[in-house]
Image (cartoon, grey):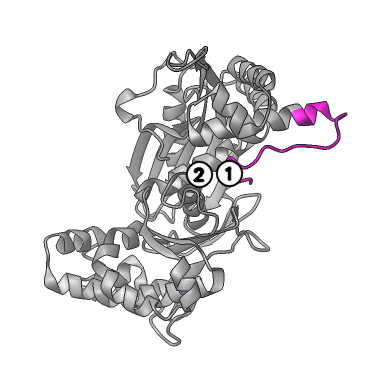
Amino acid sequence: MRLGAGPPVRRADASAQDDVRRANLSAVLRLLHFHGAATRSELVVSTGFNRSTVGSLTSELVKLGLVRERPGVVGGKGRPSNVVEPVSTGAHVLAFDVTPSSVGAARVGLGGYMLQMRRRLHTTHPHDVADVVDTIVTLATEMQARAAAGSVCLGIAVSVMGSVRQPDGLVRRSPPLGWHEVPLADLLREATQHRFPVAVGNDGDLGAVAEYLRGSARGVQDVLYVRGEVGVGGGVVVDGELLKGAGGYAGEVGHIVVKPGGRACSCGAKGCWEAEIGDNAIVRAVGRDPRESDIDDVVSDVAIGNRRSIAGVRKVGDWVGLGLASLVNLFNPNIVVLGGSLGALYPTMEPTLAASYARALGPMREQARLVRSELGSDAQLVGAAEVGFADVLEDPAGTVAARRREMRDMPTQRDAEPDIDDVRTPSR
Ligand SMILES: [Zn+2]
């Protein structure tokens, strides 16, 4: 997956006109999707195409229903340049985030607009795969029914905590969910009668993608993202590309061993980073019982200045810094984004975290800025949605045509406006 707007693709072979046209349409749509409205003049400058090319590409995207044009504001010399913007109800993705406690869902429109959001707590143990599949399908159907008539559904994209094989979306192993070899993408395709393209990704990877494209790491090329939850996930962006590894499993930072012979980890090993900094470790460190309390209790205790809780969280901060120091030495990122409970508790653990993080080599430490996630618990939904948008951004006309053909057999949708109450502007 190509991340971000990037430079327009130019091909030397002039005979491949279709390829050139597709690449040029893609360049304009990417700019609008990731950076929002722009005047035609701004598009000329950003793409390097001439005015008439930008005009004809824009008209084609308008015909596809993906962008709209409105007159620009009069001011300065000459005729105002038309403003071009993405149509959030022109195309959408149904995005999901499966965690041990719930299934989060969002209908995300072109331009990254959250048009509708839902969350459903698991009614049974998340171990029950059929129940999770059923919840996702129910939410997908409900959100799809509320989509504007004519909006092209680009597919279902799901974030899962666990090792997910690419490109087929087989969840090899998810200790927090208790899953082994679950063909989640196939199960969702079958349960929706193959009406939607389905993508399944790892929560850490999708969080990294989201922060890189729309969150704390915008404009930064080398990113390390760490999400603290019951499990600890991570993702790495190297020079603007998500690091995948041989099987697509790269970035499982939670299972690097930081304390040989230490506490038992959900993966079966001992002394993993997750066992020292995951939610249950934090709950234990503040003197609570993970069977009775959860991380939200710790966050509230800390917010009211409970000293015992603050001390416990700082003890964990020491372990967080220790792991980050090794990771920063390995990847030399410009930014380290802390998400999930680590993001929420970062200000509290900062003193001890900083002290142990100082083990990272100086040149690396100087370059890597430590920040909290801007997207917070929405990061996985935002990242999943971007995976769903990848095809239309690569080939706008071909993807819209193909999806319209496939959607013809779908049940009629009622004319629906977006849920204005739910609409959130994308961060940029
Ligand atoms: Zn482990």
Identity, as a three-letter code, of the amino acid under mark 2 = Ala
Q: Mark 2 vs ligand 1: CB under 8 Å?
A: no
Question: For residue 107, what is the image quadrant?
Answer: top left
Identity, as a three-letter code, of the amino acid under mark 1 = Ala
Number of marks: 2
Q: Are marks 1 and 2 in contact (CB under 8 Å)?
A: yes
Q: Residue 354: percent from the left, percent from the top?
A: 33, 74
Residue 168 visible? The answer is: yes
Q: Mark 1 vs ligand 1: CB under 8 Å?
A: no
Which label is found at residue 384? 2
Which label is found at residue 242? none
- The Cα–Cα distance between marks 1 and 2, rounded to whole angstroms, is 8 Å
Which residue lies at the image location 49% right of the left edge and 54% below the top edge? 208
In screen coordinates, is 120 left or right of 292? right
Q: Residue 75: percent from the left, percent from the top?
A: 42, 16
Q: On the image, numbered disc 1 is attached to which residue? A: 199
Q: Residue furthest bottom?
A: 261
Instruction: Please state the extent of the stretch shown in magenta in the rendering.
Output: 1-20
Question: For residue 381, what is the image quadrant?
Answer: top left
